[in-house]
Image: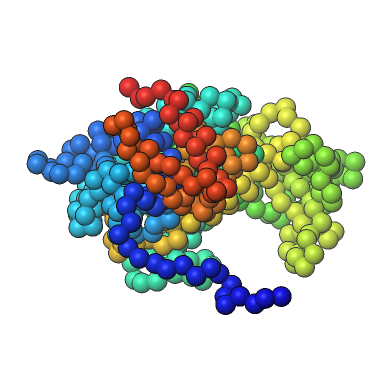
């Protein structure tokens, strides 16, 4: 066998090329902004912060940062990637201008956040209407998952503190709308908290739920059609009472800690009362059973609550806890959904694990660290991260189909957004010609066609 001089072809590098556009696939995100009307909504929301004779619109600046974060950036200066491609992203503000806008918005934090959130909620309702059968509310119910996120800080930032995992940083609570097995999810709440904030603080869960409900279409802001899911951090009397309060009547599925009362009740459950757990396809889950318990366990909780316990053989190598029984791992959750089979309710609660995927997406989309020292600036950054995650959820919902709709941000960046193209102007129109050999060119062009077929906003 003839040995080559290296593992890769030798290519000489020089500058001076024309007509080439890097990150050409990110035109899908830019078109999503335009078709959903997010640009006009954010610009209108931030109009009070637009100075006279300003060259750059505050809404456009904020969206540019969100686009940079969606493409993998993790600080304000990464907006320079967009500035290098004016043919795709238009004029982009300088780094000092971007930094001054964040400081200005942080100076009136509550007003600015309220304005941005109202714009996002308005656009979200429009996007769900555009998505049709792909929208997350097509099953007649909207599911919101709440969970805490640990964000590590490598310097002494405002409100950074030791966390329960013996790290140092912040502990925000995030809320995500679940898109089901056919999609991903989109953020609806981001509450920045100190690193030593508790996992089961009821007041913070209530605030995060209020932020989430304000992001949903009006018909989902109260009533049984909205389901709030949490882990055991949400299993407090105060939070469950708030969810079930008269006039709110929200559905809930919240994890519960295994107390001594629950543990003793589970030990008394007869073998005939245990029902096999099921998988999403309807088949029996191997080594797992569920049962509904009552009695003293329900005292002090709202009317209509149901307490469901799952026992399951632990995974190899897993250590049992003192609350487990007979060599089985016990987990428990509470719900107020009446009439449904307990195996189906347990499966629905177990699917809350998709929230962990959404947290992983957030970490890879600007939430790996908070770039500022001040808490107000970092809360603005958290809102920018949510804007980026909105775009990464709305674009697949509107333009992708099949397995590609479930692609996470990292895969979207590597396969779609990073594609290069040649910029061609003909007939007073500009075209991006993608490389024919790129394996996902057809995916990009089909997605662009679907976006262009959508009606223009307004």
Residue at image location 57% in from the left, 25% down from the top: 133
**Relative depth, front residue between 303 and 75:** 75
Q: Is 143 rendered above or below residue 105?
A: above
Q: Return the x and y of residue 164 as percentages of the image width and height.
A: 52, 66
The residue shown at (21%, 54%) is 94
Locate residue 120, reporting x and y percent: 37, 36
Q: Residue furthest right?
A: 272
Nearer the observer, 347 or 122: 122
- Image quadrant in which the N terminus is located: bottom right
Residue drawn 68% across and 39% down? 348
Task: State left or right for residue 389 relative to residue 90.
Answer: right
Which part of the image, by quadrant, shows the C terminus? top left
Residue 189, visible in the rendered structure: no
Rendering coords of residue 169 (x, y %): 42, 66
- Indicate the quadrant where residue 171 lies: bottom left
139 up-or-down from 73: above or below: above
Point out the residue furthest to the front here.
2
**Residue in the image at 44% along x and 25% along y:** 454
Q: Is residue 259 left or right of residue 207?
A: right
Q: Provide residue 4's location: percent of width, then percent of height.
A: 61, 75
Q: How is the image coloured?
A: rainbow
Specify whether 139 is left or right of 106: right
Q: Compare residues 193 and 135 and report the one nearer the observer.
A: 135
Can the viewer see residue 455 in this picture?
yes
Q: Nearer the viewer, residue 107 or 397?
A: 397
């Amino acid at each position: 066998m003839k040995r080559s001089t290296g593992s890769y072809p030798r290519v000489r590098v020089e500058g001076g090329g024309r007509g080439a556009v890097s990150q050409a696939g990110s035109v899908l995100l830019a078109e999503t902004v335009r078709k959903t009307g997010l640009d006009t909504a954010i610009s209108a929301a931030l109009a009070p912060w637009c100075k006279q004779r300003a060259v750059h619109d505050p809404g456009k600046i904020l969206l540019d940062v969100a686009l940079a974060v969606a493409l993998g950036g993790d600080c304000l200066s990464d907006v320079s990637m967009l500035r290098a491609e004016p043919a795709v992203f238009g004029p982009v503000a300088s780094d000092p201008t971007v930094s001054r806008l964040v400081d200005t918005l942080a100076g009136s934090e509550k007003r600015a956040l309220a304005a941005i959130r109202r714009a996002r909620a308005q656009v979200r309702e429009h996007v769900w209407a555009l998505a049709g059968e792909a929208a997350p509310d097509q099953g007649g119910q909207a599911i919101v998952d709440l969970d805490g996120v640990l964000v590590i800080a490598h310097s002494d930032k405002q409100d950074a503190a030791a966390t329960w995992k013996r790290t140092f940083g912040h502990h925000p609570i995030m809320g995500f709308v679940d898109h089901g097995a056919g999609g991903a999810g989109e953020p609806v709440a981001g509450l920045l908290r100190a690193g030593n904030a508790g996992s089961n603080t009821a007041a913070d869960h209530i605030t995060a739920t209020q932020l989430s409900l304000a992001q949903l279409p009006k018909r989902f802001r109260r009533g049984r059609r909205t389901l709030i899911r949490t882990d055991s951090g949400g299993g407090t009397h105060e939070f469950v009472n708030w969810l079930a309060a008269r006039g709110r009547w929200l559905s809930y599925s919240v994890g519960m800690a295994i107390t001594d009362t629950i543990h003793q009740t589970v030990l008394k459950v007869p073998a005939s009362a245990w029902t096999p757990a099921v998988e999403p396809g309807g088949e029996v889950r191997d080594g797992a059973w569920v049962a509904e318990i009552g009695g003293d366990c329900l005292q002090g909780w709202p009317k209509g609550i149901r307490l469901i316990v799952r026992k399951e053989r632990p995974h190899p190598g897993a250590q049992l806890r003192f609350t487990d029984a007979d060599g089985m791992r016990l987990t428990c959750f509470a719900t107020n959904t009446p009439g449904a089979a307990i195996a189906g309710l347990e499966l629905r609660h177990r699917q809350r694990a998709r929230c962990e995927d959404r947290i992983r997406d957030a970490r890879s989309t600007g939430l790996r660290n908070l770039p500022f020292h001040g808490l107000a600036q970092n809360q603005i950054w958290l809102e920018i991260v949510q804007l980026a995650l909105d775009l990464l959820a709305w674009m697949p919902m509107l333009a992708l189909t099949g397995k590609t709709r479930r692609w996470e941000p990292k895969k979207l960046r590597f396969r779609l957004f990073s594609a290069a193209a040649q910029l061609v102007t003909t007939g007073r129109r500009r075209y991006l010609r993608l490389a024919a050999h790129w394996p996902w060119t057809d995916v990009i062009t089909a997605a662009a066609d679907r976006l262009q077929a959508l009606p223009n906003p307004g």
